[in-house]
């Protein structure tokens, strides 16, 4: 079996890195981790040593390089079907792919006003009308998944899937900014926070000391 190397950014800030890392760790896929602190001198060259795209996350598997989080999950699901990163049922699988793509391409208001920042606590910050609309859509996604596909577990499709990895950074944002959620959505967020891999990531993020100003709109160093 080819050994995997996953290149990630700061655990406190890098939501895209969290998606790929959580998918692999929670699914039990063994990998070597290379952490590159973002926006420090030489960081792009460090990443480009693994991928010409110069972005994280990047997965290296022998002579194969995959440099985009959704593509990483698709690649891993193909190579490790036993992990069930996509639901087995065709309708559930299509739905999971759709909501991952929606997260991947959307919710820009939430991303900009409530950047991922696990170390910090900013209750009430960033709650614009546009962000409120994003949050309502996300909670509707969660409630629909739990109702239609969530039997047999606490997560969106019951067991852990790539969809949970994709929404995990949102869960962390809701905690940082103390967003009030309806009961079903809150129960789901709590379940994500209890995942062993999520706890591991959060612990590491809180131990980091780097300060990225563009991800800290509500604090000074």
Image (cartoon, grey):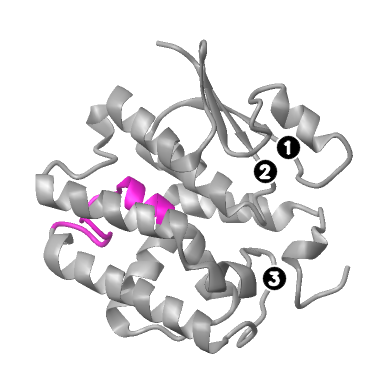
Q: Is residue 104 left or right of residue 49?
A: left
- Secondary structure beneath disc 3? loop
Q: Is residue 157 magenta?
A: yes
CA gap, disc 3 to disc 1? 21 Å
Q: Which residues are magenta?
A: 152-166
> Toward which corner of the image does residue 49 lie, by quadrant?
top right
Label 2–label 1 contact, CB within 8 A: yes
In the rendering, which numbered label is found on residue 36? 1
| Front one among 161 and 103 | 103
- Work out whether mark 2 precedes mark 1 in sequence or the reverse, and give the earlier one: 2
CA gap, disc 2 to disc 1? 5 Å
Q: In this orientation, does residue 179 appear?
A: no
Q: Is residue 205 above or below residue 31?
A: below
Look at mark 3 in the image and give the residue it sits on: 120
- Secondary structure beneath disc 1? loop
- Secondary structure beneath disc 2? loop
> Toward which corner of the image does residue 6 lie, by quadrant?
top right
């Amino acid at each position: 079996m080819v050994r995997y190397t996953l290149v990630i950014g700061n655990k406190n800030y890098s939501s895209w890195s969290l998606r790929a890392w959580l998918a692999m760790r929670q699914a039990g896929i063994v990998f070597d981790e290379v952490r590159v602190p973002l926006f420090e001198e030489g960081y792009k060259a460090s990443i480009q040593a693994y991928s010409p795209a110069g972005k994280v996350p990047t997965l290296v598997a022998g002579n194969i390089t995959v440099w985009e989080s959704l593509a990483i999950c698709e690649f891993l699901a193909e190579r490790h079907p036993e992990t069930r990163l996509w639901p087995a049922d065709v309708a559930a699988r299509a739905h999971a792919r759709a909501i991952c793509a929606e997260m991947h391409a959307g919710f820009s208001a939430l991303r900009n006003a409530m950047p991922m920042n696990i170390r910090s606590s900013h209750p009430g910050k960033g709650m614009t009308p546009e962000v409120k609309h994003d949050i309502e859509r996300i909670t509707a996604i969660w409630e629909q998944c739990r109702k239609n596909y969530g039997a047999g577990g606490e997560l969106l499709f019951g067991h852990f899937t790539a969809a949970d990895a994709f929404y995990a950074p949102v869960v962390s944002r809701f905690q940082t900014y103390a967003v009030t959620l309806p009961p079903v959505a809150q129960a789901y967020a709590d379940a994500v926070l209890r995942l062993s891999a999520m706890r591991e990531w959060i612990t590491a993020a809180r131990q980091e000391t780097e300060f990225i100003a563009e991800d800290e709109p509500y604090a000074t160093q």
